[in-house]
Amino acid sequence: MKEYDKYAEQEPAASQRPPEADPGSGANGEKRSVVSVRLRLYGNTDFYTFDIPELKLGDWVIVGAERGLDCGKVLSKETIDNIQLQEFQRVVRVCTPEDLEIMKKNHEDALAQVAFCQGAANALKLNMKVINAEYVYDRTKIIFYFAAPERVDFRQLVRDLARELRIRIELHQVGIRDEMRITGGIGSCGREACCVNWIHEFMPVNIRMAKLQQIQLHPAKLSGVCGRLKCCLAFEQRNYRDLEQQMPHRGQIVRTENGTGEVVDNCLLAKTVTLRMEDGSVVTVPSDDVTVVSRTKSRAKVRVQKRRRREDEDNMSDKEYEQDLLEKIAEIEEEDE
C-alpha cells in the first residue's frame, strides 16, 4: 500500500545523536529553533526542539510524547519567538533502519485492527465508518479514525476495544475533507488529490475564489472528490488578485486609441478587456492599451454589492455554501432559458 511505502522511502540521516533537553529556551523573548513534525501519517502537527545539525525536511524522526515515544515526518524548520513547549516535545533521533521496520510493522498491525473495530461498532449499532488506524511508535496507544454523519457516543466501544487489545484507545471523528485525505483518491485533474500528496493543513476556500478566477459556477467544476470546494482554488488566489488590481473592472470608462468605451468583460489570464464603444461596437483589446477615465455609478453599486456578498460568503458553512451554490445555478439556468 502507498502508506506502507512512505515509510520505506525514508533514508536514515548520518547523525543519530540524541539531543539534550532544552526546556528553558524560548522564554523571555528569546528565539527558539524548532521543527514542525506531523505525527505518523494522519496525526497532529506540532513543534519540537532539536539538536541534530543534519536534520532535513522530509526526515522521519522519533519524538518525545507525553507518555513515551512517537514517530513523525519533518515538515519545516522555523525560528519562533516566545514559543512555549513541554519538556518532552523534542526530537530524540532520526529514524534508523530498525525504527523504520518497527513503523512498517505497526502500520500493518494497525490496519488489521480496522475490521475488528468496525465489527465492534456494528455490534453496538453505532452509525460510524472506521477509516483507518495507527499505532504510536512504542505501541502504548492505538488511534482509530472514523467518519459519521453526526456525533457518536463511543464510550462503550472504547471500553470493549481496550478490554480486547489491552492498550490505550483513542477514537477520532474526522470530517469529509480529512476522510478524503486518509482514504485517498484521484482528482478531476487526473493526479492524486493534493490533500493526500502534499497538503498538511487545509486552507480556507470560498466561492469568491472561483468567481475571481472566472470559473463556471457549477458543482462539477468547483467540487473536489470530497464534495467540497477544491483546495486548488486557493493555490493561485494571490496571483489572480494581483492581476485583478492591474486591470480595468466592468463598468469603468476607458480611453483607447480608437475612442472611449465601457468595460463589459475582462480576461485576467489573457490580460484583455472587452469594450462597448460609443458607436455601439464591441471590441477586445489588451489591458495595457487602455486608460481608465472614470467609474460609473452602476460600478460603484456593484462594488458595494460584491463587498457585502463577499462578507456573507466568507462566513458560510459547508451546508450554507451548497444551498447558495444550488440557488445560483438555478438562477443561471433560468436566465439561459
Image (cartoon, grey):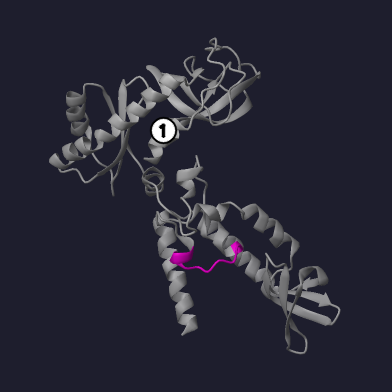
Residue 119: horizontal and vertical position, in percent? Answer: 17, 39
Q: Is residue 124 left or right of residue 325?
A: left
Q: Nearer the viewer, residue 84 or 173?
A: 173
Q: Disc 1 marks which residue? A: 43
As drawn, 43 above or below 94: below
Q: Residues within 10 Å of mark 1 (few under 14, many from 20)?
A: some
Q: From where the camera sits, is residue 1 visible?
A: yes
What's under tag 1, amino acid-wise? Gly
Does 25 sit left or right of 7 as displayed? right
Would residue 139 appear left or right of 87 to someone viewing this image?
left
Asked which quadrant contains residue 121, the reply is top left
Whether residue 291 is visible here, answered yes or no, is no
Q: Residue furthest top?
A: 20
- The residue segment tinted magenta is 212-221
Q: In the rendered image, which quarter contains the N terminus?
A: top left
Q: Residue at x 19, y 43 (%)?
A: 126
In the rendered image, the vertical position of residue 234 relative to residue 281, given as above or below? above
Q: How many marks?
A: 1
The extreme left residue here reads: 123
Residue 5 in which image quadrant:
top left
Secondary structure beneath disc 1? Answer: loop
Q: What secondary structure predominates along the stretch shown in magenta?
A: loop
Residue with the most extreme right position: 257
Q: Is residue 189 magenta?
A: no
Residue at the (56%, 12%) spot, across then down: 22
Residue 23's x, y, as percent?
54, 12
Q: Is residue 103 above or below residue 190?
A: above
- Where residue 234 sits: x, y (%)? 56, 52
Q: Give me the residue at 51% from left, 42% from top.
A: 198
Q: Nearer the viewer, residue 113 or 30?
A: 113
Vertical order, 168 against 194 (above or below)? above
